[in-house]
Amino acid sequence: MPATLALLKDSFDGKERQRAVSFWSIGSWGGSGLCALFGGLVASSLGWRWIFWMSIAVAAVSAFLLKDTPDNKMTTADRPRFDWFGFLAFIIAMVALNIVIGQGDALGWLNPTVIGPALVFVIAAVVFLRVEAGRADGFVDLTLFENRTYAGATLSNFLLNGAAGTLLVALALVQQGAGLSSFQAGLLTLGYLVAILGTIRVGEKLLQQLGARRPMLIGCAITAAGILLTTFTFLRARQYMIVAFVGFTLFGVGLGFYATPSTDAALSNVPGDKTGAASGIYKMASSLGAALGVAISAALFTALSGLESQSGPLSDLFLGRTDNIDIRFAAVIALLFNVLMVVVAIIAIALTVPRDDPGVGR
């Protein structure tokens, strides 16, 4: 993914680059929107293991499509040495963090098995930041974040990808609480997929007319509103599925408005010789945000679902069945965490992306 963004920056400019980024976003975000629907269909008809085999087939087709793609690389003399120390410190920190998030509730937060990785994360993260701050060819070029627009676009990209936990929690809720199959649950995201595919080019046009800041803010606001609708778990199952469908659709609209302005703002505000590094960090933020967002959302949902009657006096607010109130309440908390991430993204954009950021000719 970083390589594809770097090629776009090198091959296109101005409006042509923005259009290219839009189609790139359709493939990227559209693919993520398709996966819930397609995964549910495969799991219901063939079994969940087939999802992995089909993913391998998709990767093989992708490799074939890349065979004629022109290359663009540094000469051997200009190519920096790979920062193995920074890479290993970063990987150790992220793996340790995921262990803490994923296993903390199951093992106990004060269990040495959890405290150990937590300490490893802190030490590895501190070492990573101290070492990388003094390197010109580090694994992560921290000097890129001196550009406020790039920093804001990358941070908001991290947070909005983290909101992918919304899909996990809401789909798990309707399967566990309402008895839907994986395919039926996946159908709730159909509006999300269609909305992303239909609005990404709209985001491109808004970028050209308004600059990057306003479409990014509008997109985040719509995304937050969509996720907020999925928190209405107090409704009856049929009512909730209708509201959640609308919420997922708004989620997709918001991401469609946000995608191209954010990516273009990130790419257009870095020097040409750092395009590869900037693209890598921007896409790493996407993957890392999604991984941590899903992990934290799942941890919250699982931990709270295992508690009995934790909703207490709030139980009277829930309509319909009462035997699944604990799951519904757990989903509310996990989904509100995703709303919080988008709100933080809005604040980050408002503080970093300039108002007069032109969208044309950058």
Image (spheres, helix red, strand yellow):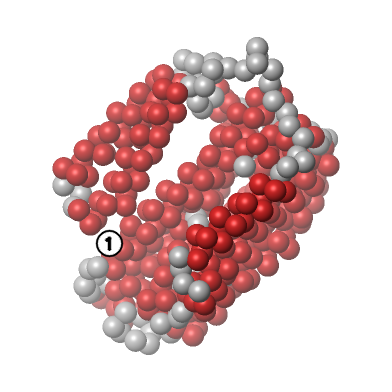
**Residue carrying label 1:** 303
Quadrant position of the N terminus in the picture: top right
Q: Nearer the viewer, residue 291 or 329?
A: 291
Please indicate, yes or no, whether residue 319 appears anywhere in the rendered image.
yes
Label 1 crowd (10 A; few <14 / some 14-19 / many >=20): some
Residue at point 62% right, 17% down?
79
Q: Nearer the viewer, residue 189 or 335?
A: 189
Amino acid on which the number 1 mark rests in the picture: Ala
Query: Considering only vertical position in the picture, is 25 above or below 75?
Result: below
- Check disc 1 and report its element: helix, strand or loop: helix
Quick check: 24 left or right of 346? right
Residue at point 38% right, 28% down?
89
Query: Considering only vertical position in the picture, is 216 above or below 73?
Result: below
Quick check: 97 left or right of 50? left
Q: Nearer the viewer, residue 232 or 51?
A: 51
Please indicate, yes or no, whether residue 247 appears anywhere in the rendered image.
no
In the picture, residue 196 is in which quadrant? bottom right
Point out residue 7 in the picture as x, y percentages from the top left corner: 73, 35
Q: Nearer the viewer, residue 226 or 83?
A: 83
Query: Considering only vertical position in the picture, is 298 above or below 82?
Result: below
Quadrant position of the C terminus in the picture: top right
Point out residue 266 in the picture as x, y percentages from the top left corner: 65, 36
Quick check: 56 left or right of 288? right
In the picture, residue 234 is in which quadrant? bottom left
Point out residue 352 in the picture as x, y percentages from the top left corner: 59, 36
Farthest residue, direction left:
111
Point out residue 185 in the picture as x, y percentages from the top left corner: 50, 75
Residue at point 26% right, 39% down?
117
Residue at point 57% right, 69% down?
37
